[in-house]
């Protein structure tokens, strides 16, 4: 299709941002017959080699996210590449003897979720995007301007021209240009922490378990992947970020083993590592007439429980369902009254999870002797309360609010 045809058309939906959440949104709409334009800055690499190096960024996919990806017909792409189910979680703290153990077996589940590299998730979704005749993609493009008129969003893209749509979806990440151009404010809180991430190989097997230890510097986690390979999430004060990145590999290995209390023995190999500052962000509004925000464009969260991408995929599924319901009732899906249903559906749940993660962070922070005193008897007690543990894990695994259809076992197809 020529660029002139692209700009002459009025698109049902334009999605800006082709990451995991943006591509899932485009796919959920395109597979249901809507005419979608997906804009992405970076080319998406679909090539895969079995011996590919492990990527720096991974996600812990919940059961709800698994169902969304399966209903979008993209799960096979993940299985064709690389993923790892984890069957247990083990949480403990540096200064008290108590530990809490979560088990899939206790919940009568096969696993508690999957650790998957972000590029694997994105590539698997993009395979389906490219196979969907209702989705047109433009790669390596930037948006220049955004205006709203005639009950449409008009998006100026590079030197190509102006694209018109009934609904513009901002899925372009934490520093969303769409959100900024739409003049939507942002509530932010700097955690004054950073996350150091990457993959390592350990002396001892991870036993398909995710291990999380709370230290005086912040949480440390091993997320189980391949044979003796784990992804790490090492949370440190912001001023230690460059120190962690600059450490020679042998020193980095020693620091990782120490932070984990040698739970998996020594670290025998390290791969590429990265780091990023941790900031809570929440858009003051998710929607305006002819505009909706999803994923990191709408909210970012402390990643210690791995809920970020899961919340974003629930956003995508809820927005897809809201739009399709409006279309079925012959309502303008870009209208504020329709989009407010999506905002009410998702904003409160996202805020609740944000604050819950901050509560965990506060409770385990080793800045007050009183908190350590309380944790000492509480953790062993919590470990014995199987019903409570299973309820908490069920909330994380399956979602809390009324689930969108895409997040349920039955497909909308």
Image: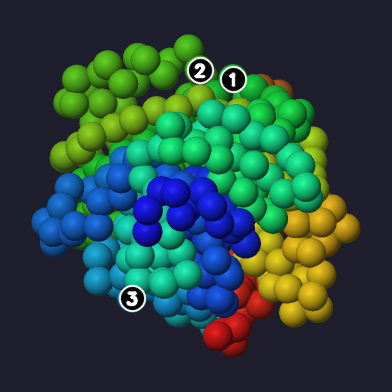
Q: Assess whether mark 2 and mark 1 are in contact (beta carbons under 8 angstroms).
A: yes
Kindly tell me whether residue 318 is visible in this rendering. Answer: no
CA gap, disc 1 and disc 3: 39 Å
Residue 3's x, y, as percent? 41, 48
Mark nearer the N terminus (2 vs 3): 3
Residue drawn at x 82%, y 70% as measured from the top left: 331
Mark 2 or 3: in front is 3
Residue 281's x, y, as percent? 67, 33
Q: Is residue 262 left or right of residue 19?
A: left
* Residue holding disc 1: 192
Instruction: Identify the secondary structure beneath mark 2.
Output: helix
Number of other residues with Cα within 10 Å of mark 1, as a class: few under 14, some 14 to 19, many 20 or more: few
Identify the mark at residue 370; answer none if there is no mark: none
Instruction: Identify the secondary structure beneath mark 3.
Output: helix
Q: Quadrant of residue 25?
A: bottom right
Mark 1 or 3: in front is 3
Residue drawn at x 70%, y 35% as measured from the top left: 147
Q: Against 126, is 292 above or below?
A: above
Q: Against 318, is 153 above or below?
A: above
* Residue holding disc 3: 76
Depth order, front residue of 108/28? 28
Instruction: Identify the secondary structure beneath mark 1.
Output: strand
Quarter of the figure with the N terminus = bottom left
Number of other residues with Cα within 10 Å of mark 2, as a class: few under 14, some 14 to 19, many 20 or more: some
Residue 145's x, y, as percent? 60, 30
Q: Assess whether mark 3 and mark 1 are in contact (beta carbons under 8 angstroms).
A: no
Mark nearer the N terminus (1 vs 2): 1
CA gap, disc 2 and disc 3: 39 Å
* Residue holding disc 2: 238
Residue drawn at x 23%, y 34% as measured from the top left: 272
CA gap, disc 1 and disc 2: 5 Å
Depth order, front residue of 57/92? 57
């Amino acid at each position: 299709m020529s660029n002139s045809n692209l700009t002459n058309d009025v698109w049902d939906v334009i999605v800006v941002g082709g990451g995991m959440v943006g591509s899932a949104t485009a796919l959920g709409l395109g597979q249901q017959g809507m005419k979608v334009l997906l804009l992405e800055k970076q080319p998406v690499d679909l090539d895969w080699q079995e011996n590919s190096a492990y990527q720096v960024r991974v996600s812990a996919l919940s059961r709800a996210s698994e169902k969304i990806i399966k209903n979008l017909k993209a799960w096979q792409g993940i299985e064709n590449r690389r993923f790892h189910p984890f069957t247990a979680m083990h949480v403990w703290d540096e200064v008290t003897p108590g530990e809490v153990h979560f088990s899939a077996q206790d919940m009568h589940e096969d696993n508690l979720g999957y650790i998957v590299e972000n590029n694997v998730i994105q590539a698997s979704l993009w395979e389906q995007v490219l196979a969907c005749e209702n989705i047109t993609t433009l790669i390596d493009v930037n948006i220049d301007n955004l205006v709203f008129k005639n009950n449409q969003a008009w998006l100026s893209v590079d030197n190509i021209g102006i694209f018109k749509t009934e609904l513009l979806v901002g899925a372009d990440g934490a520093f969303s240009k769409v959100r900024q151009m739409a003049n939507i404010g942002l509530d932010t809180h700097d955690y004054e922490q950073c996350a150091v991430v990457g993959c390592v190989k350990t002396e001892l097997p991870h036993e398909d378990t995710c291990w999380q230890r709370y230290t005086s510097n912040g949480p440390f986690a091993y997320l189980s992947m391949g044979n003796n390979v784990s992804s790490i999430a090492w949370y440190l004060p912001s001023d230690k970020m460059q120190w962690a990145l600059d450490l020679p590999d042998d020193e980095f290995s020693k620091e990782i083993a120490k932070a984990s209390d040698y739970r998996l023995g020594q670290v025998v190999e390290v791969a590429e590592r990265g780091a990023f500052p941790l900031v809570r962000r929440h858009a003051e509004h998710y929607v305006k007439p002819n505009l909706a925000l999803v994923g990191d464009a709408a909210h970012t969260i402390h990643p210690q429980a791995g809920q970020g991408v899961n919340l974003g995929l629930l956003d995508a599924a809820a927005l897809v369902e809201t739009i399709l319901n409006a279309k079925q009732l012959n309502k303008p899906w870009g209208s504020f009254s329709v989009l407010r249903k999506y905002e009410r559906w998702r904003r409160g749940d996202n805020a609740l999870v944000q604050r819950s993660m901050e509560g965990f962070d506060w409770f385990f922070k080793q800045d007050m002797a009183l908190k350590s005193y309380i944790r000492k008897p509480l953790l062993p007690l919590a470990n014995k309360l199987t019903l409570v543990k299973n309820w908490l894990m069920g909330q994380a695994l399956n979602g809390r609010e009324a689930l969108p259809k895409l997040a349920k076992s039955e497909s909308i197809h």
